[in-house]
Structure formats: C-alpha cells, structure tokens
Amino acid sequence: MFSWIISSEQTLSAADTARTAADTLHTASDSLAAGAHGGGAFDFNELLHHIYDAPKLELPWGYLHLPHFQLLGFEIVLTKHIVFLLFAALLLTVGLILAARSNTRNKVPKGFGNLVEILVVFIRDEIVLPNMGKGGLKYLPYLLTNFFFILVMNLLGLIPWGSSATGNINVTAGLAIIAFVMIQFSAIRAQGLGHFIAHLTGGTHWAMWPIMVPIEFLGLFIKPFALCIRLFANMTAGHIVILALIGLIFIFQNTAVGLVSVPLAVAVNLLELFVALVQAYIFTMLTSIFMGMGIQTEGHEGHEGHAQEHH
Amino acid sequence: MESLGLLAAGLGMGMAVIGGGLGIGKLAASAMEAMGRQPEAAGAVRGSMIIAAALIEGAVLFCFVICIILATK
C-alpha cells in the first residue's frame, strides 16, 4: 500500500502489467492512471503529490515551480515544505505581533488577541508551572515558540493546496535537535556540569556504572528522537489515511464508493484538526517535562507548591 | 522477496495496532473509572491520560515508520 503511494511515479513510467499477484495495488494504480491520462480527466497523481516534498507549489490552477540557486557554493533548493515552513514563521511573526499590540492597547483582551492570550496562559499555567516550577518561566518563550510554530505548521497542511512542513522528518528532526540542546542546556545550567555528569550514573553503586552510564547516556538521545518520530509519524499518518480513503474510489473504479469514503475522509480531516492541536501540545508538554527533570534534580523543594500558590 | 516485505509490513503494523489498541483501551478504561470516582479531579486525570496515550501511540508510530521502510524498500 505504502509502496504504491510513495513509488507511484516509477510504477507509472514502467507501464508493464506483468506483475505478481501481490502487486494488485500497483496494477490498479497503473491502469487507473493510464485511464486518467487518456481521458484527460482528474489525475490521481495530483493526490499522491500532496504527501511528499517536491520543488514545486500546488496552486488552484496548476503547479508553480520553485527556483533553486547557488549561495556561497551551496545549492539552495526551495521546496514546498520549506515554503510552508517560512510561511508559518511569517504568519506567526505578523499575527503574534498584532495580537500583542492589540492586547497592550485594550485593557480587556478581545478578538484574536484574546485567543492568543488563552493559549499563552494555558501553556504557562498548565504546562510550564506544574512541570518546571517557577524556574521554568525563563524557558517559557522557547516553549511558546515551539507550541505556536508546530501548531501553525500542522494546521497549514489542512487548508486546500497547503502542506504541513511537520510531515517532513527533516523539519521535526530540526525541532528535536533544538529541544535536545535546550534540555541539556537547562539541566547543566541548573545543576552545574559536574552534577550533570554525576547524574548519568543514576546514583547507583560504582559496580553498576558500566551498565547505568550507557543507558542514561542513550536516554539523553532517545527522548528527542522519540519527539521527532512522534510528530513526523502523526502528521504523515493522518495524510496517508485520508489519501487511502480517497484512493478506495480509484481502486474500485466506481464513483458509488465515494458515498462512503468521502464522508469518512471528512471525518478523518476533523480528527486531523484535533491531532494538529494535540501534537503541538504533546511536543511542548514533553519538552517541558524533560527540561523539568533536569531542572528539578537540583534538590530544592517540590514544584507542586508553586503551582498551587499560583492558582 | 518484495511481496514478503509488504507482508511483513502489513502483519507488523496489525500486531502493533493490537498492542496499542489494548494499551489505550486499558488507559481510557482506568481514566474513566477515576473520573467517575472523583469527578473533581477530571481535569488532571484527562491531562495525564492524553500524555500517556501519546506515549503509547508513539510506540505504535515507531512501528509504523519501520513498516513504511519495509514496504517501500
């Protein structure tokens, strides 16, 4: 199924129908694409292109091929995901500055500024303070940036002709590397380098160190790796499920199937809206938990009191 | 051989979903029970339920990525 989705371009060019029985999906995709090309009707491949990255933008009237140019000896290739990543950043910069301005101007926040304030206060009170305590407030800007950036990138994939940059593992890996640096930086800053390294032994007897140190050391990398894969797989899986539901119409070659699969695809799209929010929340939440684990081994008293007195 | 890879991907994904479904089902059952017993703690229970669900889902999604690699190799 996935090979049918992802490698359709190759299977199309090689229009041989002599295939094994296991490759029925390939042949189905071949024959229907041939039919679509012949009739000049809807091209199924336009649907397939929605999932993967390409150096062109999808527009209502066709494709816009993006430029690639040389810069300082590097070849810079603009792709769909890069464009939407930059677009999300631009949208956030403009939108949040406008929201901040309107919030400072109005005594009572209203409209868009109010919406942003709800989210900011939610992250401060429900994510940062319970997990990191008062000391975590200085990392609040980073976590807020994380949340809004991931949220906007996720949501951009749900609008027509849009694409979610978080459905690309390179983008999520970049976010996870930043999270890794922030987690270690905050831990070292709170505990000091010596205590940070001592923490790798897990506080066990020295005879256990050959086992504990590698495990704890790997644990440092597994956390951000899981963040990276989780976000990527969630966003990609949603798109693939929608594509598979729409693809049922083409596999059965029958428009009546659309009566079932289109409402299902709409339902999955609504689920995707929820997933876009939840994944931004989960990424921010887990980053703050991991940072909190580093900050709070310092030994000062529990964080629950801080959270309580804040409410 | 290619078809064996597809078979492995399909079977592996199915088994992973069984595990993930059982896990999330048990988690949701316990969370509902906790909320029923202590409705005032519903917010806190829901928050930790979503985090645990995401962690379980993460394990299934690791398998999903491996299955994609198997199927597209």
Image (spheres, coloured by chain):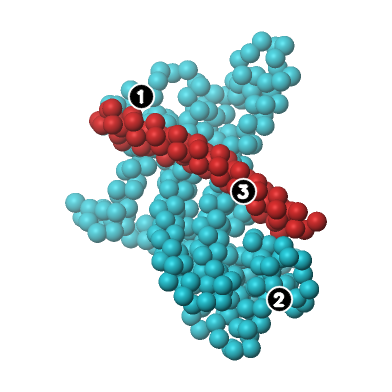
Instruction: Judge whether B19 appears above or below A199 on screen.
Output: below
Q: Which mark is residue A304?
A: 1
Label 1: chain? A
For the residues beneath circles 2 and 3, the answer to whether they share a chain is no
Spot the residue most to the right. B1
Q: Residue at x 70, y 17 (%)?
A: A209
Instruction: Label 1, secondary structure: give it.
Output: helix
- The residue lying toward the viewer, choosing from A168 and A30, is A30
- Left or right: A49, with A141 as reference point: right
Frontmost of labels 2 and 3 is 3
- The residue lying toward the viewer, choosing from A299 and A275, is A275
**What's under tag 3, amino acid-wise?**
Met
x and y percentages locating residue A240 in the rendered image? 56, 61
Q: CA distance from mark 3 to mark 1?
A: 40 Å
Residues packed near mark 3 inside 10 Å, few (<14), some (14 to 19) or many (20 plus)? many
Label 3: chain? B
**What's under tag 2, amino acid-wise?**
Leu
- Give the colour of chain B: red
Residues packed near mark 2 inside 10 Å, few (<14), some (14 to 19) or many (20 plus)? some
Instruction: Label 3, secondary structure: give it.
Output: helix
